[in-house]
Amino acid sequence: MLDLKETTENIFKLDKRIRYVAILNHQYDLLDARMREGVSSLTPAQTDRDFMTIAAPLMVDAAEKLRPFCGAIRRMAVRYDKVLLVFYRTTAHLVILSLEPQVEQALLDEIGNSVRKLELASVNSETEEDRQ
């Protein structure tokens, strides 16, 4: 089974500007969510939970309506004054990151590719374990 805690830790290792990691399945069930150790959240915990269960599905589902015309979503980003929220759709999950707002586009591409590779590596190691 995919080790979500390990995947979350590996995502934090990608860049020190990643503040928060949330992993949801495609039914928008929150599977893991964590702030980086030593970083304070800008929002109350209840607001975070409400956002994940209400706003994330609305935003992603609305964007998915263009998929037949524009192709698969690589990432969605919402930049606030104090934080950047980035949504990455992977094969099995929606990964939502909160980052420091000064992050450049090239880094967002790199993080997205790494997030997808981490998931594939986890799934591949799962398959190998099943064979043994």
Image (cartoon, grey):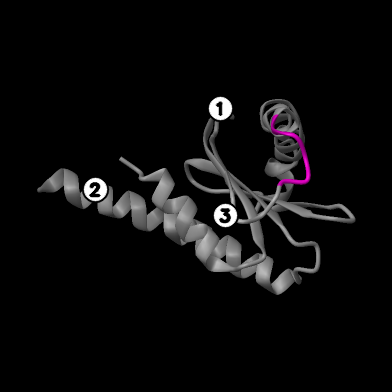
Mark 3 Cα within 10 Å, few/some/many (few <14, many 20+)? few
Left or right relative to 69: residue 123: left
Q: Is residue 20 above or below residue 117?
A: above
Mark 1 Cα within 10 Å, few/some/many (few <14, many 20+)? few
Q: Is residue 130 above or below residue 115?
A: above
Q: Is residue 77 above or below residue 50?
A: below
Q: Residue furthest front?
A: 38
Q: Type of residue at label 2?
A: Thr
Left or right relative to 58: residue 25: left
To which residue does mark 3 refer? 37
Q: Upstream in the sequence, badge 3 or badge 1?
A: 1
Q: Which residues are drawn in magenta?
A: 41-45
Q: Type of residue at label 1?
A: Gln
Q: Mark 1 and mark 2 in contact? Answer it, CB < 8 Å.
A: no
Q: Upstream in the sequence, badge 1 or badge 2?
A: 1
Q: Judging from the image, what secondary structure is the residue with disc 1 in?
A: loop
To which residue does mark 1 refer? 27
The residue located at (55%, 33%) in the rendering is: 26
Camera-side residue: 16 or 127? 16
Task: Give how far apart the Cα atoms at labels 1 and 2 are.
Answer: 23 Å
The residue located at (73%, 32%) in the rendering is: 51
Q: Type of residue at label 3?
A: Glu
Q: Judging from the image, what secondary structure is the residue with disc 3 in?
A: loop
Mark closer to the observer (2, 3): 3
Q: Upstream in the sequence, badge 2 or badge 3?
A: 3
To which residue does mark 2 refer? 127
Task: Give how far apart the Cα atoms at labels 3 and 1 are.
Answer: 28 Å
Residue 126 location (% of width, % of height): 26, 47
